């Protein structure tokens, strides 16, 4: 089967790993998601993954804690998630490594774009932990940054909704889903795709984003093959 995207960056939310539990890990959910990733990998796609940390920690709702410290805890949460995804992939026979933005040699390799690209070209999936390594920046921004650093063809944002809507489809039954959008419209209309820093990075560097539903993990392979799933955002 021909694939449309040879190298992808997949953004997974931390909440996706929690499944119906809402927090922490749900092993069946992680295994199901990783089975979908394996499908895409088996097709020949080179895959990098950025995982959020929301199943453990949301720094922006941490009360009176210093924002810098709260964000550092969030970055550590993403490292825990990256290790869990790596382990689940390996259990399914897929070679995978974790690379972190901060130096923690007892835990994972330190990220460099050259090593990440070499690992993907060698057949491994690379899971990126620690965000950008800086507070303030979201894992959306980390995803856009890593996608550009590894020269990805596209960034996949796997969510719990089947694309981008003009308003919240869970609240409004008349919400309209877009098949395609421009980054300028996303920014101008403040559509719920990703934060403005990440959207600007993608727009300014010509990186398309495909937003689709992770409820069916097979959508990852379908998206790699260019099937019409979700909403494609490009300038």
Image: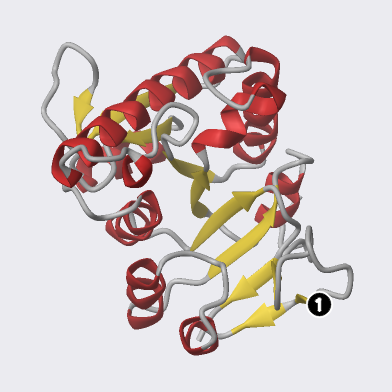
Spot occupied by residue 37 in the image (x, y as percentages of width and height): 62, 35
Report the front residue among 113 and 187: 187
Q: Residues within 10 Å of mark 1 (few under 14, many from 20)?
A: some
Q: What percent of the width, then of the height, locates residue 224?
A: 66, 54
Nearest to the observer: residue 15 or residue 51? 15
Tell me: residue 35, above or below residue 200.
Answer: above
**Image quadrant where residue 50 sits:** top left
Left or right, residue 22 beside residue 51: right
Q: Is residue 214 at all visible to an observer of this figure?
A: yes
Q: Residue at position x 35%, y 77% from top? A: 200
Q: Position of residue 225 (x, y in %)?
A: 71, 56
Left or right, 82 with respect to 31, comes to left
Residue 53 coordinates in the image, percent (x, y)? 41, 34
Tell me what residue is drawn at x 70 percent, y 16 percent.
28
Say which quarter of the image contains residue 80.
top left
Provide the residue designation for mark 1. Answer: 176
Q: Is 156 situated left or right of 53 in this image?
A: right
Q: Which residue does the image show at 73% across and 63% down from the upper left? A: 230
Seen in the picture, residue 168 relative to 67 is either above or below; the reply is: below
The reply to whether residue 122 is visible in this rendering is: no
Frontmost residue, 230 versus 13: 13
Residue at 37% in and 57% down: 147
In front here: 127 or 177? 177
Q: How many marks?
A: 1
Q: Is residue 204 left or right of residue 156?
A: left
Disc 1 secondary structure class? loop
Please tell me whether residue 23 is drawn above or below residue 137 in the rendered image. above
């Amino acid at each position: 089967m021909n694939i449309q995207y040879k190298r992808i960056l997949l953004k997974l939310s931390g909440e996706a790993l929690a499944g119906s539990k809402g927090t922490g890990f749900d092993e069946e959910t992680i295994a199901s998601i990783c089975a979908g990733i394996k499908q895409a990998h088996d097709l020949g796609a080179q895959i990098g993954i950025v995982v959020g940390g929301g199943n453990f920690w949301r720094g922006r709702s941490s009360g009176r804690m210093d924002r810098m410290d709260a964000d550092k805890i969030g970055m550590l949460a993403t490292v825990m998630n990256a290790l869990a995804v790596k382990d689940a992939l390996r259990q399914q026979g897929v070679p995978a490594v974790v690379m972190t933005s901060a130096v923690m040699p007892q835990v994972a390799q330190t990220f460099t774009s050259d090593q990440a690209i070499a690992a993907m070209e060698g057949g491994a999936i690379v899971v990126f932990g620690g965000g950008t390594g800086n507070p303030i920046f979201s894992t959306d921004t980390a995803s856009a940054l890593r996608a550009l650093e590894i020269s990805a063809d596209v960034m996949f944002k796997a969510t719990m909704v089947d694309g981008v809507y003009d308003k919240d489809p869970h609240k409004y039954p008349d919400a309209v889903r877009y098949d395609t959008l421009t980054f300028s419209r996303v920014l101008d209309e403040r559509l719920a795709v990703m934060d403005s820093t990440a959207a600007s990075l993608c727009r300014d560097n010509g990186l398309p984003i495909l937003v689709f539903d992770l409820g069916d993990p097979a959508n990852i392979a379908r998206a790699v093959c260019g099937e019409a799933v979700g909403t494609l955002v490009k300038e």
